[in-house]
């Protein structure tokens, strides 16, 4: 006789709570094109990551009640969203860089369709987010996200996570690094553009007959692109250092 495969109900519940944690992270994780991708792809990715973490699923000894299971799922989803939100700061830092440079260089007048939101967005913002998505995989940060999941599964049993004032304060403090990192990347270009503005202002002061307004925008746009190409080699180093800072702070944010 053929044996019948029996799946314990507690294993199914462990799968459900881990799936809730993984799905919460997928909401904010900076995966290029993921938010606008087909729903079956999102579902398969969440299921695949959940199954890959099967050796670390929590050991549920007794079948929980429906209310307890719902509480666990809410807690797991909140933990996953917190992890995804912190990891998403990587993309937002580069978006802040694109916003600062695009505004100063005059690229705020040029817009394109953001593939993630399907809305009009500044061309420099879309470019910087695309660069961030490429660096996310090139530096292997997707593996760090899986390691963060593995660590949280070992230290955070189902339903033990709660959003406390300490957690909220830690997330807010990490969120403030978006502005400092974006400004750190944009500062060389902004300094160059200020020098261009000063040079054109001095020329206009010396000879008021010169029509420099028509030259200001082309000079600033070309200067910004030239310097961006020159400092692009520094982006992976700054991005990796910022990612390391976020992932080191992640255990403290999730209460581990």
Image (spheres, rainbow, N blue to C red):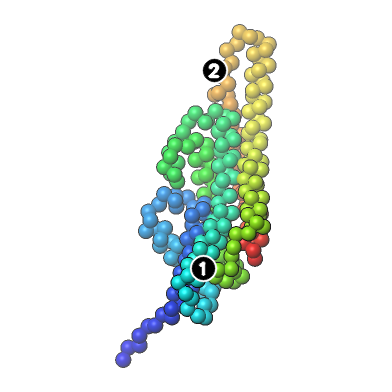
Quarter of the image holding residue 209?
A: top right
Find disc 2 in the rendering and name its residue. Answer: 214
Residue 82 point in image, percent of width and height: 57, 57
**Residue 149 visible in the picture:** yes
**Residue 250, picture quadrant:** bottom right
Q: Earlier in the sequence, mark 2 or mark 1?
A: 1
Residue furthest to the bottom in view is 1
In front: mark 2 or mark 1? 1
Residue drawn at point x = 58 percent, y = 40 percent: 96
Q: Return the x and y of residue 225 as percentages of the image width and height.
A: 56, 33
In front of the other: 218 or 21: 21
- On screen, residue 8 versus residue 129, left or right, reads left
Q: Residues within 10 Å of mark 2 (few under 14, many from 20)?
A: few
Whether residue 249 is visible, yes or no, is no
Q: Secondary structure at mark 2?
A: helix
Q: Which residue is situated farthest in the left direction here?
A: 1
Q: Position of residue 233 (x, y in %)?
A: 61, 44
**Is 122 left or right of 7, judged from the image as shown?**
right
User: Mark 2 and mark 1: span between their CA atoms?
Assistant: 62 Å
Quadrant in which the C terminus appears: bottom right
Q: Image quadrant of residue 84? A: bottom right
């Amino acid at each position: 006789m053929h044996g019948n495969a029996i799946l314990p109900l507690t294993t199914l519940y462990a799968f459900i709570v881990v799936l809730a944690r993984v799905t919460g992270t997928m909401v904010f994780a900076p995966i290029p094109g993921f938010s606008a991708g087909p729903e079956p792809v999102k579902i398969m990715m969440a299921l695949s990551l959940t199954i890959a973490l099967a050796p670390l699923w929590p050991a549920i000894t007794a079948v929980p009640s429906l209310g307890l299971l719902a509480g666990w799922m809410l807690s797991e989803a909140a933990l996953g969203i917190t992890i995804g939100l912190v990891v998403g700061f990587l993309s937002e830092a580069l978006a802040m860089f694109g916003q600062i440079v695009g505004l100063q260089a005059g690229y705020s007048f040029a817009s394109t369709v953001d593939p993630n939101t399907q809305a009009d967005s500044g061309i420099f913002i879309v470019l910087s987010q695309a660069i961030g998505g490429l660096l996310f995989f090139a530096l292997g940060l997707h593996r760090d996200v899986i390691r963060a999941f593995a660590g949280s599964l070992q230290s955070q049993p189902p339903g033990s996570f709660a959003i406390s004032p300490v957690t909220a304060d830690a997330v807010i403090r990490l969120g403030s690094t978006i502005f400092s990192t974006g400004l750190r990347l944009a500062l060389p270009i902004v300094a160059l553009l200020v020098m261009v503005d000063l040079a054109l202002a001095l020329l206009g002061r010396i000879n008021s007959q010169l029509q420099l307004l028509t030259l200001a925008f082309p000079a600033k746009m070309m200067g910004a692109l030239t310097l961006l190409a020159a400092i692009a080699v520094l982006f992976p180093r700054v991005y990796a250092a910022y990612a390391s800072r976020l992932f080191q702070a992640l255990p403290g944010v999730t209460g581990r």
